[in-house]
Image (cartoon, grey):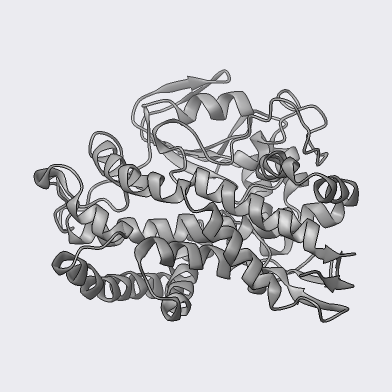
Amino acid sequence: MTSTRFYPAAATYGKVLDHANRHDPYPLFAELAREPIQQLAEHAWLVTRHEDITALLRDPRLSAQNEADPSAPTGSDGKPFRGPFLMQDPPHHDTLRAQTMRQFVPRILGMRPQIEAMVARLLDAHAGKGPGEFDVVASLAYPLPVGVICELLGVPPEEEPVFHGFAGRLTRALDPVESLTEAEIADLEVARAQWRAYLTPMIQQRHANHGDDLISGLLVDGDPADRMNLIELATTLGMLLIAGHETTVNLVANGTLALLRNLDALDRLRADPDLAPAVVEEVLRYDPPVQQTGRRATAEIKIAGRLIPAGDEVELLLAAGNRDPLRFTEPDRFWPERPSNAHLAFGGGVHYCLGAALARIEGQVALTAIATRLRNPRLVLDPPPYRPNMLLRGPSELRVAYDDVTA
């Protein structure tokens, strides 16, 4: 007679995946964090402690990529294509990431004035009309990053709804596989193909007529022998759309929710907009847009007194590490002035979030505007409804009532 081994952490983790608990998974994270590392299944582990997650994010023995599919198209390195560089390992990861950083980072560092203008325009639509309410997600958190990524890519504003639609469909790829239906998995494949088909004429046009946009920059970056091919370029742009859009949506929505639940912090930000960087860092710790990340051990790893065999999957629960009482004083308190806020929201190591600087700017500008332009803001429904995605967790709607929106 055979028996199936029971893994206690798997039952609690199953509750984390349950959408019924999406509004507040933190008690479940605290339950899981009672042990720094636990098995979820025969070949799957969960790590919850800040110190251990930090070490593992930098450990080259943990791989971010899946096994190569021999039937996949060829990447620019001549090997089977493995997906976006976020899900690849060095050395090819480093080549693609360096190309993207050289073109992406200088552009975003000069975008604060455009971002401020976008936020102002979005809130101006509600200004001077007296008491009312609006959905922060639909009216601010969603259109802002879409507008930013379209400007980076040189895409006209009328195309923004198309990007919005692709972002929602492609993001489902980041959900734990067990939460996706067969129909959703099939739609992902269709969405990826449609995304490449949508981008191909745009890329061809930039080949013929280079501009100042990110696509044009990537087409001419560096040594021609190392440049991204068409599928790598389309996949990188899709990754930037997801990473630069969905995470910012959650950052703005989660930040607004935290401020309206902690009105003393809202008042301090309103009185001193220079507090915005600290507010954003605390939102990233307290309620991060990305809740966990997965890796695969390529060699045996000993961590927190346990031995992870080569080949096993490792889930790093970033949101639990961000509330580790061994690292943060009063971890469940929203405290923007918190000293030494070394959160894990942007990951770490070679896969540290490429768009961290952009997300910070967007979050600072948007949350400052919420604090300074909305008179007497309050939540209409608490908790708000949440989107299904567990990894990129955030409200699907966040209705806020106010006495007025100032000009």
Q: Is 398 placed above or below 161 here?
A: above
The location of residue 8, given as percent across then percent down, is 66, 41
Q: Nearer the viewer, residue 394 or 251?
A: 251
Q: Is residue 82 visible?
A: yes
The residue at the point 39 percent across, 60 percent down is: 152
Q: Is 75 placed above or below 128 here?
A: above
The location of residue 244, given as percent across then percent down, is 48, 56
The residue at the point 49 percent across, 53 percent down is: 111
Which of the 4 quarters of the picture holds residue 194?
bottom left
Q: Is residue 380 visible?
A: no
- Left/right of residue 154 with respect to residue 120 in the rendered view: left
The residue at the point 20 percent across, 56 percent down is: 219
- Left/right of residue 4 with respect to residue 263 in the rendered view: left
Q: How many marks?
A: 0
The location of residue 357, given as percent across then percent down, is 51, 44
Which of the 4 quarters of the picture holds residue 99?
top left
Q: Nearer the viewer, residue 27 or 39?
A: 27
